[in-house]
Image: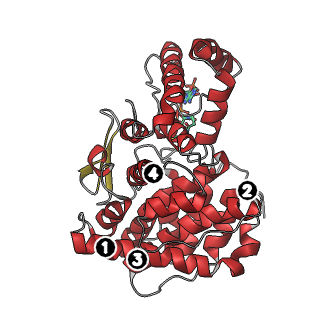
Amino acid sequence: MKELNPGLEGVVVAETRLSLIDGERGQLWIGGLPVEQLAEEPFEAACGLLLDGALPTTSRLAWLRAGLGRGRLAAYAALEALRGALSADDPMNALMASVALLKLPQQDATERALALTGAMAVLAAAHGRLRAGDEVPIPDPAADHAADLLRLLGAEGGEAGARALGRYLSTVCDHGMNASTFTARTVASTGVDTASAVVAALAALKGPLHGGAPGPVLDMLDAIGEPVRAERWVRNELAAGRRIMGMGHRVYRARDPRAAALEGALSLLPRSAGRLALARAVEQAADTVLRERHPSRPLCANVEFSTAVLLEALAIPRGAFTSVFACGRVVGWCAHIEEQRRSGRLIRPAARYVGPILAA
Ligand code: COA
């Protein structure tokens, strides 16, 4: 009988040029570049790295910026038709419903990826705006994508905020064969269109064990309130059989390298200092207590921990955190979808049947 592997740990299903994770050492390279270095680049450059395979030249960067800008404008022009889809209660449901209805360029994969990545920013921002009864601002196609996303969301931070959000988007643009990327590749392997594969990826991202963790991380920080209460709170939570959000990772056995990249982004924002101190105390307490309980299984802070503090410091509403994550990850999904298409292989694993065989 074949070996059962329910979580697919260590199973290699694809060759990729997009990202490499060294979980033991806590290192990540995206398109060959250490994540710490990519975090310093504007999101447009991260898009170029994933879609072209190299960091863009100055003129290519301008072309990528224009492509994202056109994507934002096209989504804005479609908002009236997408109003029904965007009225879903849950922001991720709204994103899925509206992405499913997008009309994307058919011929060129890079233009399609930019159109979808640009559109995602408008759709992610539109949900909260429309529910609050506000107008969705007109996108500025000449602006940096991160700066325009920040403005569309109605968030704060000015130029420093835009740089911090840009760092966040570049940091999370791709991350190996995580659940949503695997989902995108699986769905793309059936030959379906890009938007459909991205809708499936969004559904995977929504889960609290994947991209849905940052909201609960903030709920945890709120509940703890002060650094001195952190350890007792963590112990009580674990005693009640619950997991500590923002801690642990399937692949990393060291601190998630993206956490440090995001702390760099946080340092650009003056109002985050108190919250960052609380977050550090909670991380330290969780680290100590989890180490006691699982001495042979390191459970360190993952990217969602610092994501929560960063997005809160930008005054992005909690409900939009996972949608904003999708705004960065979507370009990685698009690049993986194209890689999968080039491989031409339908992803179709097997299951071990444990049910009865009934007599005919
Ligand atoms: N808090 C408390 N215990 C945790 C934990 C956490 N955050 N993460 C893992 N553990 C425990 C498990 O309960 C398990 O304990 P057991 O052996 O006594 O049953 C042990 O550590 C091994 O965990 P496992 O379920 O094998 O880890 P995984 O690789 O399947 O899980 C995550 C990875 C990310 C799903 C998991 O760490 C988690 O749920 N984290 C919280 C959610 C989160 O932050 N998600 C964002 C990920 S980027």
Task: Say which amino acid is labelled 1.
Answer: Ala
Outermost bottom residue = 107
Residue 249 visible at all: no
Q: Height in image: 105 above or below 301?
A: below
Query: Disc 3 designates what residue?
Result: 67
Asked if one can make out residue 278 in the rendered structure from this viewpoint, the answer is yes
Report the Cα–Cα distance between label 4 and label 1.
19 Å
Instruction: Tell me the mark number nearer the camera, choosing from 4 and 2.
Output: 4
Q: Nearer the viewer, residue 8 or 182?
A: 182
| Disc 2 from disc 3: Cα separation | 28 Å
- The answer to whether mark 2 and mark 1 are in CB contact below 8 A is no
Label for residue 62?
Answer: 1
Q: Which residue appears farthest toward the left when viewing the image?
A: 57
The answer to which quarter of the image holds residue 337 is bottom left
- The residue singled out by tag 4 in the image is 165
Can you identify the residue that label 2 sits on?
A: 90
The amino acid pointed to by label 4 is Leu
The residue drawn where x is 31% and y is 47% is 35
Q: Which mark is residue 255?
A: none
User: Camera-side residue: 187 or 51?
Assistant: 51
Q: Earlier in the sequence, mark 3 or mark 4?
A: 3
* Whole-percent x, y for residue 46 in the image: 34, 60
Task: Give the color scheme: rainbow, by chain, secondary structure or one colour.
Answer: secondary structure
- How many angstroms separate mark 3 from mark 4 (CA)? 19 Å
3D distance between C-alphas at marks 3 and 1 = 9 Å
**Are the residues flagged by discs 3 and 4 in contact, CB closer than 8 Å?**
no
Q: Earlier in the sequence, mark 4 or mark 2?
A: 2
Asked if the beta carbon under badge 3 is closer than 8 A to the nearest atom of ligand 1, the reply is no
